[in-house]
Image (cartoon, grey):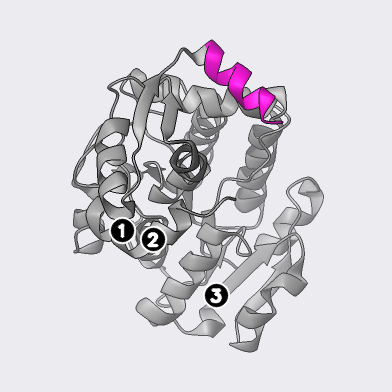
Amino acid sequence: MKSPTPTLLVTGASGKLGGAVVRHLLDTLQVPAERLIVTTRNSDSLADFAARGVTVRSADFDQPDMLAAAFTGADRLLLVSTDALMEPGKRLTQHRAAVQAAADAGVKHVVYTSLPSADTSHVSFAPDHWGTEQALSASPLGWTILRNAWYFENLAYALPGALASGEWATSAGDGRIAYIARDDLARAAAVTLASPDTTNRVLTLTGTQAYTARDIAARVSTLTGKSLSVVDITPAQQVEGLRAHGFPRVLADVFASFDVATAAGDLGEVTGDYARLTGQSPTSLDTWLTANIALLTTAH
């Protein structure tokens, strides 16, 4: 028999995406706090949710033995992909442990945050996501894969420095990205987690339009009044430039792979999955840029 009021669990709830998901569950969808469990490595960081009546638990993905206990009592679980990017393979190990723990804990359905074209993407950590998708498919769990397109917020990594110099060096060429706001993705994850839908499905959540770096540069230049030209470089030059700015080799390769993936068309697909899932259109680029221009003009 299906539980009429399933208990929902969000991992990584102290992160920007996970925290936004919890806020959408509580405030947008009005899910009662007593139906929510949130986890993070340091549970003290979630005192604000605890104060609202949400159950807060400690869960360290590097200690798989403790995960099943942390997940116990949850009917539906949102597995937010971890940030373990510096050690190749570590994140997939963490995710596989979480999938196994969810099954051991009696969780019925897992929602997972992946990326577009996980099986073929040139993004360096795409195999982590594809491996997690495969682990879910092979498990006894029900699952929903949310292949999240690139955040608008990712522009904050490149644009402040580019605006300061007047040049945006990229190896993405004329490749396009179907950007979407992180908060829209959080809303979509909250809706999916709270849904009674138990079918296994893959959704690709994107904006309504895909943009080249030059499209973005033109808009940002107009908004800021600052000249911003796009300079085409090779992936190898990009890695060299990032390393010259102090990036470790692993991280430089990760960031360069984003542009390689963009040039290859891995991030340009536009779908209507977001609107079908949430019943509303995602935030447009122009709306987001106007509201967040300070984020793109401040060094990070």
Of marks 1 and 3, which one's residue comes earlier in the chain?
A: 3
Image x and y of residue 43, in percent: 74, 70
Which segment is the magenta one?
Answer: 236-246
Label 1, residues with CA under 10 Å away: few <14, some 14-19, many ≥20: some
Q: Which residue is pictured at 61% across the width and 80% down the height?
A: 49
Instruction: Write down the quadrant of residue 216 in the picture.
Output: top left
Secondary structure under badge 2?
helix
Q: Amino acid at mark 2?
A: Asn
Secondary structure under badge 1?
helix
Of marks 2 and 3, which one's residue comes earlier in the chain?
A: 3
Q: Is residue 192 shown left or right of residue 39?
A: left
Q: Is residue 165 shown left or right of residue 49?
A: left
Image x and y of residue 124, in percent: 55, 24
Q: Which residue is pictured at 71% across the width and 32% down the height?
A: 86
Please say if the residues under marks 2 and 1 sit with CB atoms less than 8 Å apart: yes
Mark 2 vs mark 3: in front: 2
Which label belongs to residue 288?
1
The answer to which of 215 and 47 lies nearer the viewer is 215
Which label belongs to residue 36?
3
Q: Is residue 104 shown left or right of residue 24?
A: right
Which residue is denoted by mark 2 in the rendering? 292
Mark 2–mark 1 Cα distance, whole angstroms, equals: 6 Å
